[in-house]
Image: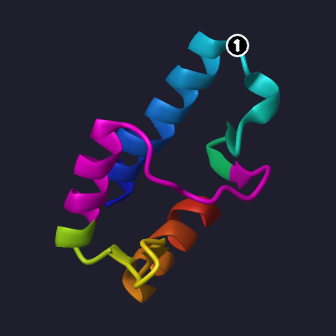
Amino acid sequence: MQHLISKWVLDQHDRIMYEKRRLDSCWVRRAEGRIYKDQDYGPRLRSSRHRNAVSILRDLGLLEIDGDDQVLLTDEGGKILERVLSE
């Protein structure tokens, strides 16, 4: 899971922030082999790729969607996120 999150979430985050030159609005950063949360980020549905990513993470049991269409981490998703951010 660490490899998947690193490649598909963190690398994508970094690529977009550098392309948009919005380095001050990053929600996570990497330093000395660790991942640090700089600010909270609430996911919201936006691009067509986002729906696909949410669908995959739901299939893996890492996300769920509540009655108000809010995307939420499952307990397992939260554990994995915590583990990745603490390494």
Q: Residue at x 35, y 41 (%)?
A: 8
**Residue 64 is inside the magenta segment:** no
Left or right: 73, with 18 as reference point: left
Where is the C terminus found, in terms of image quarters? Answer: bottom right
Mark 1, Cα crowd under 10 Å, few <14 / some 14-19 / many 20+, is few
Q: Residue at x 22, y 60 (%)?
A: 55
Q: Residue at x 38, y 83 (%)?
A: 76
Residue beneath disc 1: 21
Left or right: 84, with 65 as reference point: right
Residue 57 percent location from the top left of the image: 27, 63
Q: Amino acid at mark 1?
A: Arg
Between 28 and 45, the one nearer to me in the picture: 45
Q: Is residue 18 above or below residue 58?
A: above
Where is the N terminus found, in terms of image quarters? Answer: bottom left
Residue 23 percent location from the top left of the image: 75, 24
Outermost residue to the front: 68
Snapshot quadrant of residue 18: top right
**Residue 52 is inside the magenta segment:** yes
**Dot 1: element:** loop
Q: Is residue 87 above or below residue 79?
A: above
Coloured how? Answer: rainbow
Total residue callouts:
1
Q: What segment carries the magenta color?
A: 36-57
Q: Is residue 77 above or below residue 43?
A: below
Residue 14 percent location from the top left of the image: 56, 28
